[in-house]
Image (tube, helix red, strand yellow):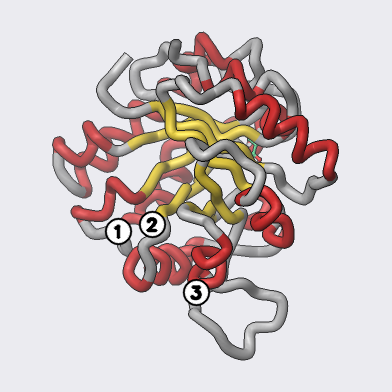
Amino acid sequence: ANARRFFVGGNWKMNYSQAILEKVNDALGKTKDAEADIVCAPPALFIKDFVSSKPSHVQVAAQNCYHAKEGAFTGEISPEMLKEAGCTWVILGHSERRTLFNEDDEFLKKKIDYVLNKTDINVIACIGETLQERESGKTNEVVERQVKAYQEKIANNQYDRIVIAYEPVWAIGTGKVATPQQAQEVHDHLRKFIEKNTNGDIAKKVRIIYGGSVTGASCKELAQQADIDGFLVGGASLKPEFEQICKARQ
Ligand code: PEP
């Protein structure tokens, strides 16, 4: 255990129905005394439905945003609009955005820069290596490059507004969770890398969460690792076991 407050994000991806909303709110209703920041990210169109039905201790994230306030950007949504709808967080650089929608580090730099410097929205900044990159021994190199891109736009006094989500691509939505040791090894490496680019105080305080097939069954052991400060959860964030995941540290 450590002094960093536990953080659990629920990424609903492109999933929504009235039944899902009710089931998730049921689970969230039992997390009031969980010692964790709990942040759920419904599809943008349904953010307001969630905002008006969720328990008050739960915060709301968007799954993506654009790096401008308004204008001729067909299909995009601004951080200002998300804030108006009730979001206090945004997920940036999810592997599905990187892979399926060609978002690269340069583009993500513009987004994190805009969100941190033009709004007061907080950022869940995602990174992670592919299976091929891991198998060719490039994990550290890849996550360093991805974190460095974000760090170019994060001022030292903004680290309390970001959470780094380490999500190995091979573990997302595959049912193949990283072992606690595999995850801890990368988190430890990332914390040292962040220290090198900032300072020891920031590195000690910044939250690094793990994502990739986390379930009620796997969350406890992962949560015991020294440098794992919480989770970003996809599939299981829509299920009753999300309650256990929110309480993984208890
Ligand atoms: C995610 O989408 O961030 C994720 C980790 O998904 P899953 O938990 O389903 O692997």
As measured in the structure, the alpha-carbon distance from the residue carrying label 1 to the one carrying label 3 is: 15 Å
> Which sits earlier in the primary sequence, circle 1 or circle 3?
3
Q: Amino acid at mark 2?
A: Tyr
Q: Secondary structure at mark 2?
A: helix
SS assignment at label 3: loop
- Gap in angstroms between the C-alphas marked 2 and 1: 7 Å
Amino acid tagged 1? Ile
Answer with the quadrant where ligand 1 appears in the image.
top right
Query: Which disc, if any, is residue 154?
Result: 1
Taking depth in this image into account, of 28 and 12 the one nearest to the observer is 28
Q: On the rendered structure, is 38 left or right of 51?
A: left
User: Residue 73 in the image: x percent, y percent?
Assistant: 64, 84
Residue positioned 34% across, 28% down in the render: 5
Q: As displayed, is residue 49 above or below residue 6?
A: below
Q: Position of residue 247 (x, y in %)?
A: 51, 17
196 or 219, which is in the foreground? Answer: 219
**Coordinates of residue 74 in the picture (x, y in percent):** 70, 82
User: Residue 150, labelled with which disc?
Assistant: 2
Give the residue at x 49% y 80%.
69
Q: Tags 3 and 2 in contact by the CB under 8 Å rule? A: no
Q: Which mark is residue 67?
A: 3
Residue at 54%, 23% (x, y): give it: 31
